[in-house]
Structure formats: structure tokens, C-alpha cells
Image: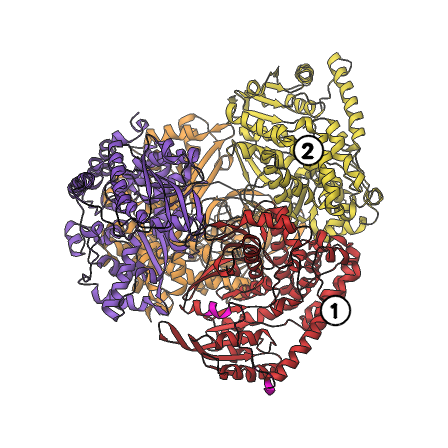
Chain colours: A purple, B orange, C red, D yellow
Amino acid sequence: MEYTTEDSCKDLQIAYVGGGSRGWAWNFMTDLAMDPQVSGTIRLYDIDRKAAECNRIIGEKITRDPQARSSWHYEVSADLAGALTGADICVISILPGTFTEMRSDVHAPEKYGIYQPVGDTVGPGGFMRALRSIPMFAEIGTAIRDYAPNAWVINYTNPMTLCVRALYEVFPEIKAFGCCHEVFGTQNLLCQMLAGEYGREGVRRQDLDTTVTGVNHFTWLTAASYKGLDLFPMYRSFAAKYAADGYTVGRDTNWLNSFFRSAQRVKFDLFLKYGLIAAAGDRHLAEFMPHPYLDSPDAVRQWGFGLTPVAWREENLQERLERSNRLISGEELPNMESSGEEGHLLIKALLGLGSLITNVNIPNRGQISNLPLGAVVETNAYFSRDRLDPLFVGGLPPNLHPIFERIVCNHENTLTAALTCNRELALETFMNDPQMNRITIGDGKQLFEDMLSAQKQYLPSQWFA
Amino acid sequence: MEYTTEDSCKDLQIAYVGGGSRGWAWNFMTDLAMDPQVSGTIRLYDIDRKAAECNRIIGEKITRDPQARSSWHYEVSADLAGALTGADICVISILPGTFTEMRSDVHAPEKYGIYQPVGDTVGPGGFMRALRSIPMFAEIGTAIRDYAPNAWVINYTNPMTLCVRALYEVFPEIKAFGCCHEVFGTQNLLCQMLAGEYGREGVRRQDLDTTVTGVNHFTWLTAASYKGLDLFPMYRSFAAKYAADGYTVGRDTNWLNSFFRSAQRVKFDLFLKYGLIAAAGDRHLAEFMPHPYLDSPDAVRQWGFGLTPVAWREENLQERLERSNRLISGEELPNMESSGEEGHLLIKALLGLGSLITNVNIPNRGQISNLPLGAVVETNAYFSRDRLDPLFVGGLPPNLHPIFERIVCNHENTLTAALTCNRELALETFMNDPQMNRITIGDGKQLFEDMLSAQKQYLPSQWFA
Amino acid sequence: MEYTTEDSCKDLQIAYVGGGSRGWAWNFMTDLAMDPQVSGTIRLYDIDRKAAECNRIIGEKITRDPQARSSWHYEVSADLAGALTGADICVISILPGTFTEMRSDVHAPEKYGIYQPVGDTVGPGGFMRALRSIPMFAEIGTAIRDYAPNAWVINYTNPMTLCVRALYEVFPEIKAFGCCHEVFGTQNLLCQMLAGEYGREGVRRQDLDTTVTGVNHFTWLTAASYKGLDLFPMYRSFAAKYAADGYTVGRDTNWLNSFFRSAQRVKFDLFLKYGLIAAAGDRHLAEFMPHPYLDSPDAVRQWGFGLTPVAWREENLQERLERSNRLISGEELPNMESSGEEGHLLIKALLGLGSLITNVNIPNRGQISNLPLGAVVETNAYFSRDRLDPLFVGGLPPNLHPIFERIVCNHENTLTAALTCNRELALETFMNDPQMNRITIGDGKQLFEDMLSAQKQYLPSQWFA
Amino acid sequence: MEYTTEDSCKDLQIAYVGGGSRGWAWNFMTDLAMDPQVSGTIRLYDIDRKAAECNRIIGEKITRDPQARSSWHYEVSADLAGALTGADICVISILPGTFTEMRSDVHAPEKYGIYQPVGDTVGPGGFMRALRSIPMFAEIGTAIRDYAPNAWVINYTNPMTLCVRALYEVFPEIKAFGCCHEVFGTQNLLCQMLAGEYGREGVRRQDLDTTVTGVNHFTWLTAASYKGLDLFPMYRSFAAKYAADGYTVGRDTNWLNSFFRSAQRVKFDLFLKYGLIAAAGDRHLAEFMPHPYLDSPDAVRQWGFGLTPVAWREENLQERLERSNRLISGEELPNMESSGEEGHLLIKALLGLGSLITNVNIPNRGQISNLPLGAVVETNAYFSRDRLDPLFVGGLPPNLHPIFERIVCNHENTLTAALTCNRELALETFMNDPQMNRITIGDGKQLFEDMLSAQKQYLPSQWFA
């Protein structure tokens, strides 16, 4: 990496772990190509090498697109060492296992009345996904320690908290953080409220000042303002107005969210209960507070959100594979519009090209004063040249505090169980999730064993020794 | 207070708050009368002044008994200030409210399938008892600050943790601790095991070395030895042997426990699950881990313990009142045998008359390294002249840690709710108890309101403003 | 206070404690008058009421100046209660005592070979100034608690750290912070370096990204960049180049600093020793690290800075009094240029009118990870609508850490001694300052007593009981 | 190791690192031989293998002595692995370097007016000894991790704090503690006071209850009692009475202390200044607080203690070598009297054969509440079967706190410098010792280099790369 002027930088080396990703990678490559301040090399690494090859071709098409404003060189790396050596930035965006395992994660618990709208964060599905992801991230973190210890590392993989936590566990000095766009959705909702309810059009989510606290997919805003306006009293009226029937005006049409619409009823209900703005999609929020939102498929419907079937994901993947083919063949041209994601902006901030405050997942150094140090939390942080400094947000309020302590304990125990293949601790932790309240220990044990077996291929063999 | 030699002390001033107690007070007065090293004055204070007067008469009979080895003067105080002024020691043993309120605590939740064997520690009953006890202890703590700031304060009242916590909240420099004999029962069980299973007769609980950790009524032994013997492997066999059918040999016949027998099945089951020795009566343990032990009255029976009906307590009180009358009239002579309680030994240790290590409830200063500082916990501590220093026990194991974090959070929230009469926080905390898992929010709210009303007389009026 | 649009605000109520200040107040009043986004009322309170009356007249002239862009109403308050009641903002800028006491602070120790360039922060002078300031700030803090608990409080008085610390001691929920322009000077030096040594003209200090850590007047930059440029390697060359002879190009001509010029040799020397950029004037830095810079008046000269005599301050005050008279009489017109201070920007940020990151003195909530929580430290913080959130800077490096631990301990002990009038603790703390290394205990005691007597009028009478 | 009954144990495996020690080893071997409850094997390891062979012969003579009450087998190990494999207990008592290096430690600084009575703990001598000891203890700690991770490790080597700290640095799970008899001397002084001043004969130091806090050789008693007697008021009179002329009655005649007599004037002076009982020899105490006690050889004499010349140590070693020869040849018979040391009692306590409370050096886990966690401190701890639990002592008083923070920082920096061979950090830390106040930086640097060179043979070669 080399600064050409203090305002731009060339020869940036980016390692992309999971570089065969269909969809998210394309956005990222486009965002970079559209940015005139940075250029360099992107090394794609994927256990599915063929997928990485496809993306190399697509990346090259993107960077050669007439609209592109910067030039990127694409390579496919044979292994982590090759991708990481010399990297300034490492992006991690992998699928831990396949949709076959995810089918077990999401649907196996339904037999026992446990319905998960997403199943990748907490609950039995999130737990199992963590068990198989943690060893993968331990391997990636170790490789970063050995081959790119000074690189900045951005993770996009779920379960976000435990993936980032695992990186820090194996390499405490790692400069890693996790990014998620869920908070953006709630910020957009606030903008919609300003426009639709208060006639203030044209406010963008970036114009708001929001104080974020929590853990990924269970984040809360403890303050929100637009210039001199305190948005809390406004939101109180807004939530009260739409609590019963839901708010369906001006939905987000981003493809990522198209299936995932909600009527925001969970969000409003949580505001009325806790006085803070829950800032993630209702599907995610409900997984942390299953009762009453996930009591039954009917309850889910009444609360105005959906259970995403893995079958849909499989179909969607099929469509994306086809699009990949079209992009490679030239049948379809790359979409050169900005994705709305912030990845390239964060990279630039870390290069000194425009500091930024945004929400991010990193270990707690005290930014949340009443959660344990070291637990991965999501709060605002300040990105500047080669620095990422969290902003102090204070303590969680008493009524939310016990809920978070339980989450953090479960996370720590999941990490320990995953790294030591400790079956007893794993089962106890699996059972300690609030979604498991509705199930007996006997049934829980059976479910645990079934789900563990279903992902045997992606787990260390010690689990079955 | 004055040392006569370095080995004995006269003119000790003891304030006894709740000095009208029938039963426990008599034991305490006897233990003191039988100890030749200390003498002095006991000032009885009780909101039921007549009861205190009765105990004054009984106390005088005890101290004049021919077997008595030290002389005590008894007074009845009209108020806290009178009892506390000049006190070296303050003993607190009150009943927060009456058995009418306790009837609500214990039995009101049964309507919703929540069965409580005791109902004075956690669960809906323990929570409600805390709500009314905390303001009482805030008042007592404030009086101690004002009238006897240097006195050592021993609490025997339940809910132990929150009563002690409230004292420290209003007077952080207070020299207070809480004593409970539940751990002794498990130590006695270990002695029974040594005798019955291993042929080592005559070992007393005081001869064991046990490492205690947890909170009151949910205490655990993380180590236990008798001289060179590690008791854990022995207990493992013991628990396995009796897990299915229970252990009923050599029961404790102390009157306090006579109704409260158990087959130790909960204790054995917890050992098999967690690998540590749960050290409280099964009735208490089950209240912290309701599932499966409290799933139904049938489950309770199968697990080999009982649900203590408040009606029994009322009858028992009647018997004790009658005994009080007989003691006053001289129809019955005081029982001059040692109670097995440690209160007088602790007082003597604090006077320099024999240091002692035992388990005690005090704020966490780090003795349990992974629970918050300030939370009241139960661990061993060293009692010596005017000092009480906790022994470091280390961290709770990962599988128990989340359970304790939840308990501590609920305690802190209960304290805040009780001191600020915060209805919302109170309800959320009430609902966050594991016993409440089996109940809907609507039912929970109804139960909360019903139970609050049932103890209206003993709550600050702000609750109903 | 009322928002007229989300971009401006009227009827802001500002309490100005020490509102009779000559000089600093005028800048502040001008900065406010030149800002079109805010208007309101400024209530001047001063123990020298006549001085406050003078400033009221000057303030009214400033707000009526044709260049003024906003309108302010001025009042003189008879007491703290009057000034504070209803205040949105409270500015504190007082002189603790008079220059008579300061003469003792600065010059009394010279008899024993202790030379202080400023004498208001640490060393014998700073200590004595703290002893008399702390009770004043305890009084002000208590008044804020009682009359304006929700106001934001900005302190400008030295000793900054202990003044802010005292406010938090008496009112832990206070929303107070301390501002100081010393860091700005070093940021300006970096800009001069960029222009003079590297040909990059026109960079303003606000364009730099600097990571600030330490305590007031002993602040350090652990990172500094301008866009993509890392300023550390540049500063390394710069310091090496000018270490021997000093850097005297492009001095700051701000009147506040005119007497206070330095050749930056202390700053360069500290960089060469510690590898970090000391970010305060050399006069202040030398007081924290007296050896060798303060070994003698000759040493001071050689190191290229000056000892500010109190006589100069007295003359300067005389000039400012005369200017006050001229401003009142109209003989001189107010200077309507921006002062370069940030006070009004911070106020606006707290109103939601433009968020801001800058360095500020507030209690440590973990932003410096290896200093005690609660100690007042100076780091960057993010100012936004009704929030002030520190940015985490991490731990002080090992070689500076012990120096800071000693400073923090001395501060805490000074606070305790000042609030309890504890003569023993005061003397020990006085002697524990590094400047006192060169003096015997006997001499130190004599000096302590002499300096205490010299400010008798401004100390609680218990000191002399 | 095997328990024969619960009251005794055979086949105990003890690794003795530094097993060639002349003097201390003999006491330890005798204490073990005289104890009927334990027997087993002692494996002597020493870099001076011949010395270990000599002690093997002496050990065998001791165990065959007619007075011996238990039987021990002696072996000489060729390396650490051999000594440690299978060990239940590891004793470390080495001389880091030789008296040649110690001559530099103690006497080189005298050229600059720095006089050290001992020179093995702090000050320039202690610092240099630490630099060479830390890598040795890192090696020993690593070997314990690899060959005897479950062994209990007792260190007797100075500098105690940093030797223990280094063990925990390389193997955080180590079960190590450091023992020192300095506190015993002060406890004995209290007994002498009781007998000589108050007529209470026959009280032994073990009968006292003392609360110990601090770091090795700079320990303080914050409470001391004998049964009901508070010894503080007594000590206050005692200190006042003998402060001017010293107390020379009833000196300790233990050979270890014979040269090291003092008149206790430093101890009394510190009591009068700080109100707590300094509990180490005056020679050690003065090294932590050099002014005024170490201002000059004259000052030392006036304060009533001595500067131990290394020449004396060399002569004394010669005598001990001769005694070793006599013991081997049989010319002299072993002394079978108890040494008064506690080592064998601690070993027995850890085996379950008699629990014990005594002062010990271990990492701070909160026992001193205002010193950093992990710093090695000396406080009381409870020894029981396979456990060592510190007792909480609370915070150091404010006037001593800054002194200890500086000590702890210097220790941590010394450790870092020693393990990383960081010359800059080493020099800064060397200069930050209070003993170095009287020396210029130039002289300090020269002294540093001279002393470093003087021990070149015992330092990692990176120091001179």
C-alpha cells in the first residue's frame, strides 16, 4: 500500500476470505471500483476455489466497466497463507457449512415447537452454527496472526459476535471488527418517520446521531437525534400509533431485505416495554426475546414478520448462481450502483481518507460499562487513520441488563465448548437459551444430539470421539 | 464492652432487633448464657413490644438457670435508637410482615402452576418478601448508621441476600454479615456419608474443610476434604448410589428441620449434572432451578422433598406461643443445651476470643472473581478481632456462571425497584425469575398485582399512588 | 431554551460563574455574539459583583456591535442560586484567591531551589492552589446539584483536573467537563512543521487527527495524522533537528501565550525520551517532570522557556482593568474576531447543532485503560446532542505509566486532604510531588506551613483549628 | 504421594531447585526429618551439581539421625526435567548469579552516594538482581509447566516479588507462592513488647492475629491483636518510648539475623509517620523509603542498622562451606532442632494435614483492593488441602497508596524489560526507583551500564547485541 497523495492510496492489498460469495462480493467489488481514492489488488480465497475463480472474472469485468473510477487487480489464492501474506485489509465473508446444515439449524427445532425466523444468531440454530463457525474462525485468526498480523480485518459472517470473539481469542492483538447493516434499517425507519409523520423529507440515516448499544442483532438505540431534534418523543408517538397494526409504509426495497419485510410490531412493542429503540430487524429481535413473538407460527404472523425457510435460501442461491453465470458470460452487465454498505468507507477511514463514526462489533473495553470486558459488543466507534476507538456508551439499563448478561455468558460458554469440544458445557449452554424454555431436558438432549449429527461433517472429530 | 482479661469480656452491649422472636431468640439467649467468656446486656426491640417483654422474662430465667455460666441483663427498648445506642453487636432476626403475607407469597402462585417449597428467597414469593423487607432493612441500616456505626451486625432474616444488601446500600461502611445454617446441613450429610459409607465415625462438620461459593440458599462446595481425604470422589459414588431412591439414613433431627426432611435427590442430581456439591436443603435448591424439580406437586414428591404449607407455620407458631407462656409461667424450664448455631462463636471471634473460618453473607469484594463487586454472596470468611475478611474462592465454573449472573441481576433490580417503588422494573424482574418461565405475561401481570395488593399493609404507599 | 428550527436555538440560559473575569469572558461573549445559531441570556455571577457589572456592560456593547450576528441578554446574579436556576449551560472560570496567594504559590518555594514556570497545576504551587480551589468547587458543584442538575457545566479554571474532580465528588451525576487550549498549541506546532519543513501550507489544527491521552497540562499524543500522512515519522525528524537549539519559527502570537513563548526544547526532549508527542506548553510539561528542566533558573533558560513572575500577572491584570474601563466608556470598541477557543462550538454540539470530537477533561470511565476509574483525565471525546462520550485511547505505555499513577494518587490524596482538612495527608502529598525531591523533610514542612498560612483567608478555618 | 491414613502421607516427591544451598537446605531437611506425618523423596537439582551431591550426603545423614522421626530418600537430578517429573512439591531457593555479581549490585552505586543495606530487593542492586533472576525463573516456570504442572511451588529466592511474578508470567496456572520470614521478626518484636513492657510472658508470634499487607520486604500490619488485646495502642507507646534511642532488648539470635541487628528505629519512625506497623527488618524498609535513613553511612548508623557488605557474605559462605565439609565427614553432627521456618507446615497444610493462615507472596486477586490484579503482593492466606486462598485485607491507606503504586509499576516494567531485553525501559525503570532521586541522569546512565556489564555472564546475550 502506498499513499499517492495524502488523499488517495494505491496498491492496497485486500485478502478476501470467502471470496467466492455470490452477491455480497459483487457489491463490495463495485463499491471499491466506484471509489476514486483507492486502488490495488484483491486476492480471493475460498474453499470453493471455482467460486473464487468466477468472482475473479466478475471482479475484472467490474473494474473494467466504463463507469468504474478506480482500478483493481484480481487474483485467486490457493490458501489462506497466500491470500493473507502482504495484506493491508482482510475481509471475511464465509458461509459456515452449507444450506444443508442450515436446514437442520432452522428447521430441526420446529419439531419441538421452536420456530426461528433466521436461526443464525442465537437459539438452537445460532448455537449450532456457532459450534461449527468458531473452529473455522480460530483457523482464520491464527493464519492472520501468522501471515498478516498488522492487517485490519472486517468480518461480515454470522454469528457475528462469536466469529469476531473467536478471532480475538486466538490472536488478542488482532485489529478486527464486525460490520452489520441491521442498525441501518432502524435508522432508515427513523428517517421514514421524520418524512411520513413529521414532514421532514430528505433526511438520510447518516444525518442522524444515534447512540448504539448491545450485541449484534440485539442492538438498541439509547439516544437518537437529528440536529436539535430529540427523536425519542417522536418515536414514542410513532410506536404507539402503529403498535397494533404495524407500519408498512415506505418499506426498504434492498434485495437483501425484500423477503424479510416486517411490520415493525416487535420493535414498537419492545419500545413500549423498555423505553429504548430496538435497532435490528424484527426477525432478529424476536429470536432474543422469543416470548410472545415466537410462541407459534400464528403468533409470528400476527406480529407481522416471517420465518425464512431455508428452501427459499436455496432457491435464492440458485438465482444468484445463474446471475453469476450471466455476469461471467457477459449476458448481464454488472450493477455499478452503490450498495449502501459502508465497507469501503471504513477501509478508507482506516487509511486516513475520511474519519467516520459508525456502529461496529468489537470486544468490550468498557464502552458498555456493565458488561464484561472482552465480550464482543456492538456500539459506535470512531474510525481514523489506523485506529478504531470505541465510544463510551455507559451502562445498559437495569431492565435489559440481566438479559444481556445471560447472552454474554452463553456466548462465552459457547466459545469454550466449541474450542474444547466439551459436550456437557455445550448442552447446558444450548439449553440456557431463552428459546429453549418451552422444551423439556429430555427433548432438548435429543434435539442437541440430532443437530450435532446433522453438521458432523463441519465439526472437529473430537465431538464424536 | 470491657475486656476483663484478654480471654473474656464483660458489659457487652447487644441490640436484638426482632427480639420478640419465638424460638430462635431462645436458642441464642441460651448459647450466650452457656458461654463463660462473655456477659453483658441484651436490649430487645420488636415492633411487637409485648413479644419482646415475654422474651425479656424468658431471657432472665435462662440467665438465672443453675446451668448458666455467664450473666446477662435484659432490657426492652422502645425504639431502634434506644436499642442501638451504645451497642457493640446488633442481631437482626425479624419476620417481614406476618404469615398472612407469607400465605400470599407461597400459595398465590400455585393457581398458575408455580409451586414453592419455601417461598422466602427467590421465585414470586421471595420477590414479594424482598419488596417488603428492603424498606425495613433500609430503615434499620440507617438507624445503625446513626446510632451504632461501629457495631457488628448479624442478620438472620430472609431473604438473606437482599436484607444484607439493603443494609450496605444505605450505609456502605456498615460492619454487617448474614448467617445461615443451610450449609451446615450439607456438611453434616458429608459426615454421615463418612460414617455410613466409609466407616469413619465421629467426624464433626467443623472438622471438614469445605470451600463455599454462591449466594444464600444456593451455595455450592467446590472443594471438601477431611484431613488428607478428598471428599469429592467419595461423594461421587455416594450421589450415584442414592440418586434414584434418595438417602434417608441418619436424618437431622433438629426441630428446625424436622418438617423439612428431604431425600437429597435434588442435591445428588445437581452433583451429577454440575460436578459440585450443592450445599443447601433440597427445598431451597429447587427454587433456584425449578425445572424439573418443581414441575408439579407430583414431581416434588418424586424428588423426595416437601412443599411447606404456611398453615403449618401458623400451627407451629401457635405451639411456640404456648411454649413461651409455659416458659414465662415456669411450667417449662428453659432448654440449656447448645443449639448448634454459631452466632455466639462469631461474636466472640470478633471480640478476639477465638478466630474462626465459616461461611457468611457479605458483599463481594472479589472473593467470587466473576460476579460483580458489591453483590452479596456467600463464601467462607475469617473472623478475628474486629475483622471479617472473606477468603478468595475464585470464579464460578462456566456452567453455573450464567445462572448466578441472572440471580445477581435480579437481586440488584429487586433492590432498585423496592427502594424506588418502580412498578415496571419490579414486574420485569418478577417475570425474569426462572420459576416464572411457565407462565404467560398476562397471567404474570395479574399475579404480580394480586401479590402486591396482598401485602399492601407492609409496602410503602408510593406503590399504590 | 427553545429550538427555533432543528438548526438553531434561542433563549439559551447560560450561568457564568466567575463572570467578572477580565479577558477570557470578553472572548467568550464575542464568540457567542458572532454565532448566528444561538441566542439567549447570560447571567454573570462573581464574588466581585462590581466586576460582573462591568462585564454586563461590556457584554451588552458586544451584542449590540454591528458585526454581532446573534442577540444576548445580560444579567448580573446576586448569588449562585440565582445564576444557576433555569440554566442550560454553566461556565466556570474563576480565580481561586488573588494574585497575593498566587505570589506565595509561585515564589515561596524558590527559597528552597524550587522554580515553577506557572505554579498552578502541580508542584507546591499547584498543590496549594488546589487546597483552596477544591472547597470552592465543592460549593459550586453542590449548588449545581441543587439548582441546575441538568445543566452542562464547562470549567476553565486551574488546577483543571482537581476542579473537575471536586465537582464530580460532590455531585456524581453532574454533566461537567473541563476545557483547555494547551493541546491546540501542539497541534498548531504540527501544522507549522507541515508548512515549514514539508511545504504543506494551509493545514489547520482542526484538520489533523490526534489521539490525546493524559491529564491536563501533561497530555500526550499517541497518534497524529493528516489524512493519509502519519505525522510521527515527520515529528521524529523535526524533534531531532531542533532538539539542541530549539524551534522558534512561526510562534503563536495569541495574547494569552505572548509572554509564554518557548523553544519547544522540553517537548522535543520528551519525544526523544518517550517516543510520544508531549502536547502542552513546555512550561507546564516541565512542572510534571522537573528534572532536569527546572534544576535552576539557568537550566530553565537553557531549555528555552521562562518562569512567569506573578508580578507580570499583576501588571497584566492592571492593563486588562484599564481596557475594561475603556470598553465600558466606549473609548475602545470590542474586538469582534473569533478567539480560536472552542467553548461556543461545544455548547452548540451539546444542543445538537454540529457534533464534534475534541480533547476534554472528564472522569476516566475506561478511556485510559490502565488508570483508575473516576480519576479526571484528558482524552478525546465525542460531543453530540446532550451527550459527551469519551473515546477509548487504550493504556498508557509502560514507561509513562508509573508517572501517571503517581499523579493520580497525588490528586486523589489532595482531594481527600482538601475536603477533610487533613494536615498529615496534605503534607505527605505535598512532599510526594516530584518537584519536592530536592528538598529535605524539615524544609518541606516549613514551606508547607508557610504556604498554608499565606492563603489562610481562602481556606476552611478547620485547617488552623 | 500416598496417604497412609488421613493424617499422614508417604512417598511425597519434592523437587528442590537450588538444592546445593548451604544452610537453608539443611534447615529444611531437618524440619522434614523431624516431622512424623510426612516422608518421601527429595530430588536435589543445582547448576552446581557437586553442591547438590554434598547436600544429598548431608540429607541422608539427617534422615538417619537417631532423633529423626520420618524417613526421606535423597537423589541428585541431572536437570530440571528430572527433578520435576512426578514432583508433588517444588522448592526453589537459588542464588541468582554469584557474590561477584552481588558485589556490583550492592557496592557499585556507593560511588554515587547510594548506600544499600541489602541490595537484593529494590534500588539499583535489587533491580539488577531482578534482571538476571527473571530469565532464570522464566525457565524454571516453563519447566514446571511442562514437567510438574500440578505441583505446589514454594519460592524462597529474592527478589521475591519478581521471582514469583515471573513464574506466573510464563505459566499463569502455576500453583506457586513465595515465603519470607521477615514478618515473623516483627511479630516476635510484638511478643517482646508484650513481655518486656506489659509483663505478658510466653506469648508466641503464632498466638498473635496480625493483618499483613504490602509487598515482600515492605509489608505492613494494619491490625494486630493478641486475643482480646488490641496491640496498636500498646505499640504506639512502645514506638514513642524507643523512637529516639532504639530498642535493643531481647534481640533475635537466629543465626540468619545475627549480623543484621537493628535498633528498630526505622520501624518506629514509620509508625509515627504512617500509623501502621512496618513489618520487615529496618534494613529492608529503608531501601523502599531511602530518605532520610539511607542519606549517608552516618545516617544509617544513627538510625541504628547496618549496611551488609558483600565481603561478609563471602566470608560467611566460606564458613558454611567448611561446615558442609564437616557434616559430610561426620566431624560435625547435624543440628536436629526446628528452624522456626514454616515451609514443612505449609507443605503439610496443602496435603490436608493441618490448615494454616500465614503471610505469603502471590498475585493479587483483589486481596489488596487498590493495587492492580496480578501484581505479586504479600498478605495473609489460608492454606488447606490443595488450596491456597488469600484473605481480603482491603485497600492500602491513601498515604501509602502512591508509594505502592510506584513499586508495582516499577516491578511490572522491570519484568517487561527483563523478558524483552528492552534497554530503554530498563534504564527508565532503574531511574524511577526512589533511591535514584539523588543522582543525575548522566550518572544514572553510567551506573546502569556499569552494573549491566558487571553481570553480563548471567544475562541473555540480547542485552549486549
Is A449 displayed left or right of C367 in the figure?
left
Is residue C241 among what the camera can see?
yes
- Please give the count of numbered marks on the rendered protein: 2
Please, which chain is the residue tagged with disc 2 on?
D
Q: Amino acid at mark 1?
A: Ser
Q: Which residues are magenta?
A: C328-347
Q: Nearer the viewer, residue D186 or B352?
A: D186
Q: CA distance from mark 2 to mark 1?
A: 47 Å
Q: Main secondary structure of the magenta part?
A: loop
**Which percent across, then down, holds residue D226?**
67, 45
A272 within the magenta span: no
Left or right: A298 as drawn, with respect to A422: left
Numbered disc in front, either 2 or 1? 2
In this figure, which residue is indicated by the disc labeled 1? Answer: C453
> Which residue is tagged 2?
D129
**Quarter placement of the C terminus of chain A:** top left
**What secondary structure is marked by label 2?**
helix
Query: Farthest residue toward the bottom?
Result: C329
